[in-house]
């Protein structure tokens, strides 16, 4: 019979410590929001979210929208360019990604099948990302048509 102890699984201890830190940080963020009760409506409006979304986002881990960065990279979309041209679109993409319930599936699909389009069936950001892809492609076409023909 094999006995597994915490000493034989240092990765498990580190994982538990990290999890506990995340939980405590979430509690601290939620506590800060509770202390801002009078300004909560204004804060939510300024952030472009509802009060309940604000609480939900505050409870999430700081890396809750990391899949978005990976997806943007896979689609060859420049986050910085989107922030410059459409900051509200980027904020909405991050909000939707943070609140998404398909994170494990998204992460798994991104690791196993990065070139697959299966994510488009369940990703709540799929339509916005498709529009950004089309806009980027149209921008390349327009930029290309503005240059003088070769040899002139």
Image (cartoon, grey):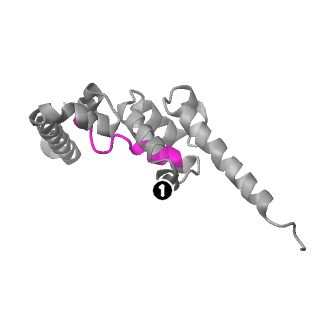
User: Does 103 appear above or below 136?
Assistant: above
In the rendered structure, does residue 18 fall within the stretch colored magenta?
no
Q: Residue furthest bottom?
A: 152
Q: Residue at x 40, y 32 (%)?
A: 104
The image shows residue 147 at horizontal and vertical percentages of 79, 65
Q: Which residues are magenta?
A: 58-72
Q: Quadrant of residue 53?
A: top left
Instruction: In this rendered view, identify the residue nearer to me: 74 or 38.
Output: 38
Q: Nearer the viewer, residue 52 or 39?
A: 39
Q: Is residue 15 left or right of residue 146?
A: left
Binning the other alpha carbons within 10 Å of mark 1 as few (below 14), some (14 to 19) or many (20 upward) gives few
Q: Nearer the viewer, residue 149 or 79?
A: 149
| Residue at the (38%, 36%) spot, across then down | 95
The overriding secondary structure of the stretch rendered in magenta is: helix
Q: Which residue is rendered at x = 19% and y = 41% of the image?
A: 22
**Residue with the mark numbered 1:** 80
Relative horizontal placement of residue 36, taking residue 49 as reference (left or right): left
Residue 65 % position (x, y): 38, 41
Image coordinates of residue 101 in percent, x first then y, are: 38, 27
Q: Is residue 41 left or right of residue 37?
A: right
* Residue in view at x 51 percent, y 36 percent: 109
Reply yes or no: does residue 62 show up in magenta.
yes
């Amino acid at each position: 019979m094999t006995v597994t102890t915490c000493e034989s699984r240092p990765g498990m201890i580190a994982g538990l410590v990290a999890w506990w830190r995340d939980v405590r940080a979430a509690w601290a963020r939620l506590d800060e929001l509770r202390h801002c009760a009078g300004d909560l409506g204004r804060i939510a409006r300024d952030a472009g979210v509802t009060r309940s979304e604000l609480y939900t986002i505050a409870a999430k881990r700081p890396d809750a929208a990391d899949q978005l960065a990976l997806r943007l990279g896979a689609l060859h979309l420049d986050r910085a360019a989107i922030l410059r041209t459409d900051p509200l679109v980027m904020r909405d993409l991050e909000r939707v990604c943070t609140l998404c319930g398909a994170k494990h599936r998204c992460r798994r699909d991104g690791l196993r099948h990065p070139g697959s389009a299966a994510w488009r069936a369940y990703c709540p950001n799929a339509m916005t990302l498709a529009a950004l892809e089309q806009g980027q492609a149209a921008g390349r076409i327009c930029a290309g048509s503005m240059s003088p023909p070769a040899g002139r």
